[in-house]
Each structure stands twice: as structure tokens, then as C-alpha cells.
């Protein structure tokens, strides 16, 4: 697979990474054997940036990734996240108190079975803890050899700058896809200015852009898509009209809608790394092939004409989840 640099001082990784969250729930039941096979196939294909978090499960996702990569540690770059208080297997609340960061990192290292976390993200900005304290604590963990690189997730430009002034931020993770383009307003420019790699999660719109999705009501309540505002009865059909444009361009290229959607992101800049999530080998292979899809200026213009920023029906999160997004 083609390679991209992770920040100014980070390692080179595959142009596409792998979001691992769905391998332990969140998007319906998962088969562990298939998930493990998907992780191994990803490494074989050069998809080397593996994205997990302590809150996924909670804890079980890190455990799965750790068990799988134990004999292939040198072939992967492991990204995980802190930022939630978790007690007795229950997620209590967002928190980035320095003591909790240290505790979280020690737990992640143990579950992943590694000596050093390659990329450590703050999962969500904690308004109760100054970002300077967060960055300083991660800097101490870097000095101690427990962490290599520092990242932020869903942080505003102001927060990014404040953190970066204390300890270099290597990557900023946020949602970005053809149907979610808010980051183009200011966040992408901030990252480019500071030399920060942008890691795009949900680059396929939680599967909607693959053309294989269903209305929210057809998913069980154990599936995040059941509550997705963009897949409800009043938004789903309107958003299907956007998908028709994606399908049309994909058909012209002889590829799938999901592949052309990922190719669009890859063509937005060499400093963008999409991390589509999947728990199945066949979809992993389909996604990986998107790195070879070529788009020209006319193709990119066609996307902008058909799916301009802000056209998607419905917000990307329910209010409870939006409350944890830093935009100030």
C-alpha cells in the first residue's frame, strides 16, 4: 500500500488505517475469529495504523488488538485513547485528570501487551482539565518511554494550538467524509499550518457511503446506527439522494461507492489518513483497494458540485454525544 507520514516526526504508515471499534460491538455483534483474521489481513495489505481505545468495550477492544498483534508488533503502529473514567466495566464520564491519564496508559499498555503506545489520543476534550495539563502529562509519559506521540480527537483549533504549545501534537482525529465536512472550515487549515496529520474517522459515514446501509429502525438497539440522526425516517431518504451521486461517479470509475468515497478523502491531501472501520476481511480488502483509485480535478469538482459541504440531512450525533465535542 502507498505510505503516508504520521506527523512531522512520526513513522510512515499505510495511506489507510483501520478503525477497530466495531470488532467488539458498537455496530452489532462481532465474530472474534473474523475480527482477528481482519487484523492480520490488514497488516498483510500494509494497513499498519490500528486504531483502538480504552472505552471500546470498554477495554475488550484493546485486549483483542493486543492478543492479535503480539507476534507482529514491529509491523504495526498502535493508536489508542484515554479520556473517560471507567469503573467496574462501566463508562462513568469524560475525564482527563492527570492521575487518570497515567492510570489509563498503564492499563492500555497491559491490555495491548506492549511497552510503548505509538500514538496516544485524548479521546474527548475535558473542559474541567486545562489542555495544558493534559499535554504536559502526556509529555511526561513520552519522557518515561510509555508513549511515543501525542494526538487529540474532536478538538477545536484553539485547543489544538494550546496543546501544541506545550507538547507537539502529531495527529488530530475527527469525523470527515463526503457527508461530514465541517472540519474544512478551520480545523484542517490549523492542522496543515502546524504540521499535524489529520486522521479521518467514519470516512464512510458509518457505512452509509458504501451503499449497503439500512434505515435506522432496521438496526438493533445494540447498534449505533439505530440512533444515528442521518439514518432516521425523516433524513434517510434525503441522504439517499446524495448517495446516488457517489454511485454514479463510482460506476464511471468501475469501483464501489465506498472505494470512491475513500479515494476522495485520500485526494484531499497527503496529510490525511482515513481509518475506515470494519470487522470483516472482505470489506477490509475492498477498502484497502481504494488507495489505488485515481481521481482527477474534474472528478473532485464533480463531488463538490453534487455533495457540497452542509448538504447532508441531519446532525452527525445525537445531542448527548454532541455535548462532548470541543468547538470553542
Image (tube, helix red, strand yellow):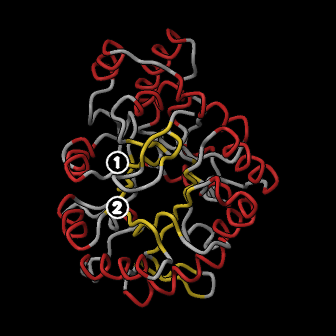
Q: Residue furthest bottom?
A: 99
Residue in the foreground of this view, choosing between 139 and 82: 139
Q: Tell whether label 2 touches label 1 (CB within 8 Å).
A: yes
Q: Residue at x 35, y 49 (%)?
A: 197
Of the numbered discs in the image, which one, if any, rests on residue 237? Answer: none
Q: Position of residue 294 (x, y in %)?
A: 46, 18
- Please identify the quadrant where the N terminus is shown: top right
Q: Is residue 152 visible?
A: yes
- Please identify the quadrant where the C terminus is shown: bottom left
- Identify whether 156 is placed above or below 43: below
Q: Position of residue 140 (x, y in %)?
A: 38, 82
Q: Residue furthest top?
A: 252
What is the C-alpha distance between the residues marked 1 and 2? 9 Å
Q: Tag 1, which secondary structure?
A: loop
Determine the image quadrant of residue 29. Answer: bottom right
Q: Residue at x 57, y 12 (%)?
A: 254
Q: Tag 2, which secondary structure?
A: helix
**Residue that label 1 marks:** 315
Q: Residue at x 53, y 24 (%)?
A: 292
N-term mark: 1 or 2: 1
In the image, is 280 to the left or to the right of 308? Answer: right
- Identify whether 222 is placed above or below 255: below
Q: Is residue 232 visible?
A: no
In the image, is 183 to the left or to the right of 224? Answer: left
**Residue that label 2 marks:** 322
Amino acid at each position: 500500500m502507498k505510505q503516508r507520514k504520521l506527523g512531522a516526526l512520526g513513522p510512515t504508515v499505510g495511506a489507510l488505517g483501520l478503525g477497530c471499534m466495531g470488532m467488539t460491538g458498537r455496530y452489532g455483534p462481532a465474530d472474534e475469529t473474523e475480527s482477528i483474521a481482519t487484523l492480520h489481513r490488514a497488516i498483510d495489505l500494509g494497513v499498519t495504523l490500528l486504531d483502538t481505545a480504552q472505552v471500546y468495550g470498554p477495554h475488550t477492544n484493546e485486549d483483542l488488538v493486543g492478543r492479535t498483534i503480539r507476534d507482529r508488533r514491529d509491523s504495526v503502529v498502535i493508536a489508542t485513547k484515554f479520556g473517560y473514567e471507567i469503573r467496574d466495566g462501566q463508562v462513568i464520564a469524560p475525564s482527563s485528570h492527570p492521575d487518570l491519564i497515567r492510570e489509563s496508559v498503564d492499563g492500555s499498555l497491559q491490555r495491548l501487551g506492549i511497552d510503548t503506545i505509538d500514538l496516544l489520543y485524548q479521546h474527548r476534550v475535558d473542559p474541567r482539565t486545562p489542555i495544558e495539563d493534559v499535554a504536559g502529562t502526556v509529555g511526561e509519559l513520552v519522557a518515561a518511554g510509555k508513549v511515543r506521540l501525542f494526538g487529540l480527537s474532536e478538538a477545536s483549533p484553539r485547543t489544538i494550538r494550546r496543546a501544541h504549545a506545550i507538547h507537539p501534537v502529531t495527529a488530530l482525529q475527527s469525523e470527515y467524509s463526503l457527508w461530514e465536512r465541517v472540519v474544512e472550515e478551520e480545523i484542517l487549515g490549523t492542522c496543515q499550518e502546524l504540521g499535524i496529520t489529520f486522521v479521518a474517522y467514519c470516512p464512510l459515514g458509518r457505512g452509509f457511503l458504501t451503499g449497503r446501509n439500512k434505515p435506522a429502525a432496521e438496526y438493533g438497539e445494540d447498534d449505533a446506527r439505530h440512533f444515528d440522526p442521518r439514518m432516521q425516517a425523516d433524513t434517510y431518504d434525503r441522504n439517499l439522494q446524495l448517495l446516488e451521486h457517489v454511485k454514479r461517479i463510482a460506476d464511471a470509475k468501475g469501483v464501489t461507492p465506498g472505494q470512491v468515497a475513500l479515494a476522495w478523502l485520500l485526494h484531499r491531501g497527503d496529510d490525511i489518513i482515513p481509518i475506515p472501520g470494519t470487522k470483516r476481511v472482505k470489506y477490509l480488502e475492498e477498502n484497502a483497494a481504494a488507495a489505488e483509485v485515481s481521481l482527477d480535478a474534474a472528478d473532485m469538482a464533480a463531488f463538490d458540485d453534487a455533495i457540497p459541504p452542509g448538504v447532508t440531512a441531519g446532525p452527525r450525533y445525537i445531542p448527548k454525544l454532541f455535548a462532548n465535542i470541543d468547538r470553542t
